[in-house]
Amino acid sequence: MLSNDSSNNVDIMIKKPKKALINMSIPLILSLLISSFYNLIDAAWISGLGADALAGIGFFTPIFMILVGFGNGLGAGTAFAISKYLGENNKNKADNASFHSILIDIIVSIIITIFLLIFLETILKTMGAGQTISYAMDYGNIILVGSIFVILSNALYGIFRAEGDATRPMYAMVISAILNMILDPIFIYTLNLGVKGAALATVISSVFVILILFYWSYIKKDTYLKPNLSNFNYEKMISRDIVKVGLPASIQLLNNAFFAAVFSALLTFVGSTDSVAVYSTGWRIVTLTTTPLIAISTALISIIAVNYGARNYKNIQIAHRYAMKVSIIIACIIAILTNIFAGDIASIFTSTGTSVRIAPELTSFLSWIVIYYPTMAVGIASTYVFQGVGKGLTSMFQTILRETFFTLVFSVLFAVVFNFGVWGAWMGIVLGEVVSNNITLIWADLYIKKLININD
């Protein structure tokens, strides 16, 4: 066991996994809520520019998800590798891994940025952006130029989570969110930059996150992990541990972006660009309302990885089942409240300009989509179990099975084959999620029992 007082968070993850889950989940919930909230603020301000502007941002959303996906994916790989080394009581290797992760993040972000800048217009045209492409290009080019900050900030959170510290990333996100909320109306309307202003506000706020996190690590120097060049010694195995979870985790989030792109094209086929505006805006609300479920499962990765490194497999089962129990209760409450207040929530984003015309469809979307929330509570926690034990490919396969296979197939079946139109697309999401989330739950439970039996 680690003896340094600063290792208290790691000790709690090993000795008291339930307490560790709550300790990490609360600041993570607040962090992700704030992040989702200022995404909604973006949408609310942009809605004042009209439905076409909102739809244009919607077409770029899958590409933005690629950036965030790589950041979150690499963050998951970082959290797994470092937490595992801490569970093995190897602090030096954990410090070395933290610097490895930063280098990997920078290299990946440069490659992705160059690729997407070159092919952005082609991708948007393929998605069917049509008359809204100018808005998507104006917003997208600025975001892509600053994408290194978006990717790196999300990935750096993994270093803090690996040592059980989810509080300081929360502080960074609060400051970033407040700054973004202040800059949005100034850039969009006062400076008359339109969607370009919204993009600039997002990039600037991401820069501030990097500065704050770097301040704690390199100026104040009071973090437990030390991602310093002096602690760096390239090891192929460390890079492999980060990448074997980080890359599949990124790809599974890329798959989400792929689904969003294909789904937007499906909506354009069976509906119109207004339906894309409904989907992109509605999904921001879904992201916000399901944030507690994502946060609890994200905290689960580090807790499982530490106990996996320490070979405390029973604790993995305890943490997994406790995470699902708490998540189901939260999911049911959120689903009921969202359904009741669907119209009021929709009105926030459809009160001005041409966006008023999408209000009924957005209300309908919010009323129906919540059906799958309780199953999401068990599905996402079960998927993240496999990231916590280093089985990134399994986690990726489960996500692809959910999004690309079940959800997309059901959406096409109901929307096109059965000719239910846009409503059928919404129901395809619900049914696909319900079926796949339950499959994932059974899969994870059987795997954990196998680990326990082997250890016995």
Image: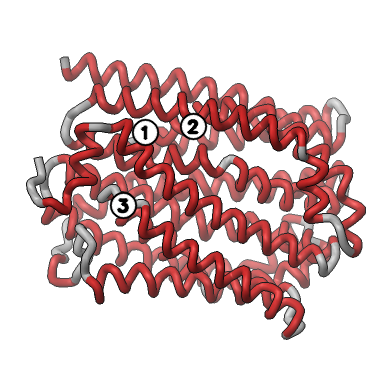
Q: Where is residue 73 shown, x and y percent of the image?
A: 42, 50
Distance in Å between CA atoms under marks 2 and 1: 10 Å
Disc 2 + disc 3, Cβ < 8 Å? no
Q: Where is residue 456 shown, x and y percent of the image?
A: 16, 14
Q: Residue tagged by mark 3?
A: 165
What residue is at 58 percent from the left and 40 percent from the top? 290
Secondary structure at numbered mark 2: helix
Q: In the rendered image, which quarter is residue 98 located in? A: bottom left
Q: Given this view, does label 3 or label 1 mark the residue nearer the observer?
A: 3
Q: Which mark is residue 398?
A: 2
Report the side of 323 relative to 452 (left or right): right
Report crowding for label 3: few under 14, some 14 to 19, many 20 or more residues within 10 A (C-alpha).
Answer: many
What residue is at 52 percent from the left and 36 percent from the top? 399
Q: Amino acid at mark 1?
A: Phe
Q: Quadrant of the N terminus?
A: top left
Report crowding for label 2: few under 14, some 14 to 19, many 20 or more residues within 10 A (C-alpha).
Answer: many
Q: Residue tagged by mark 1?
A: 386
Q: Where is residue 403 shown, x and y percent of the image?
A: 60, 36
Q: Earlier in the sequence, mark 2 or mark 3?
A: 3
Q: Earlier in the sequence, mark 2 or mark 1?
A: 1
Color scheme of the displayed model: secondary structure
- Figure check: 388 above or below 224: above
